[in-house]
Amino acid sequence: PPTFGMYSFDAGLVGGRVIDVWRAADYSIDVEGICAHFAEQDESNAIKLLFLTSPNNPSGNWLTDADLARLLALPVLVVLDEAYVEFADHPSRADWVLTHANLVVLRTFSKAAGIAGLRLGYGICPSWLMAQLWKFKQPYNVNVAASVAGLASLRHVDQIMAVVDQIKQERARLFDALAAIPFLDPLPSQANFILCSVRDRTARAVKQALEAQGVLVRYYNKPGLDNCIRISVGRPDQTARLLAVLRSLA
């Protein structure tokens, strides 16, 4: 952490022991910290799964090839969440599954395809794992509406990726503009949002001031995300509205 919280939540639901390895100040993975836990384990407390996100949510940063390769050398099944990978300037690691028997890559239609409410996604797994997954797969896990929407998305990949390219261009413009706001420190992002640390005032106050003007952002005030807001990349007119309100608060 800070990262996508559902994996630790789900592990807790089934009685799993969760080990949190906090990210560095720049939100990069603490590879040394992760490796240290494996050096300390024994048969009675062996680590079974390692969950990673790239691009990370909510920081948007990318897990480097070198760091991923080092973590894949550990004796553990690595699950890499690539929910936002379409927005990155780097390729997916899906093809790494062909050469790493301990890697699972998760993808979703929720972000780039924009059908989050239908809960449609998939995993790219080594063949040995599939037989185990089929043992507990729910029989009706994908509904008809999600299936139809997913197939439609696959028929319009070029259109979807054209929109993604527009979002990436707008992200660059938004980042530069946010960096010029005196009370914000934006973090470079490989996702469709930008995390900003707030200076000289509370993030809650900024969030409330924006909300009063009809602009909604995500507000954080918890360990690892103290006094931060996360801003989604929208259309140019939405960016203009956001920046106008932020500049009025400076």
Image (cartoon, helix red, strand yellow):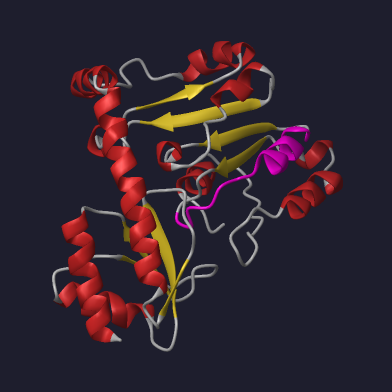
Q: Position of residue 52 (x, y in %)?
A: 58, 42
Relative to 245, is 227 on the left or the right?
right
Look at the image and say whether residue 60 sits in the magenta stretch. Answer: yes
In percent of the image, x 56 and y 10: which residue is there? Answer: 131
Q: How many marks?
A: 0
Look at the image and say whether residue 43 sits in the magenta stretch. Answer: no
Q: Position of residue 114 (x, y in %)?
A: 25, 37
Relative to 93, is 154 on the left or the right?
left
Q: Quadrant of residue 240?
A: bottom left
In percent of the image, x 57 and y 57: which residue is there? Answer: 1
Q: Position of residue 143 (x, y in %)?
A: 24, 21
Q: Position of residue 233 (x, y in %)?
A: 30, 54
Depth check, front residue: 176 or 50 = 176
Q: Is residue 52 above or below residue 132?
A: below
Relative to 211, is 6 on the left or the right?
right
Q: Is residue 210 above or below residue 39?
A: below
Depth check, front residue: 102 or 43 = 102
Answer whether residue 152 is visible to the viewer in this image.
Answer: yes
Answer whether residue 119 is visible to the viewer in this image.
Answer: no
Depth check, front residue: 94 or 9 = 94
* Magenta residues, start to end: 58-74
Q: Is residue 26 above or below residue 40?
A: below
In percent of the image, x 28 and y 74: which residue is there? Answer: 207
Q: Quadrant of residue 100?
A: top right
In percent of the image, x 30 and y 86: which residue is there? Answer: 250
Q: Is residue 226 above or below residue 135?
A: below
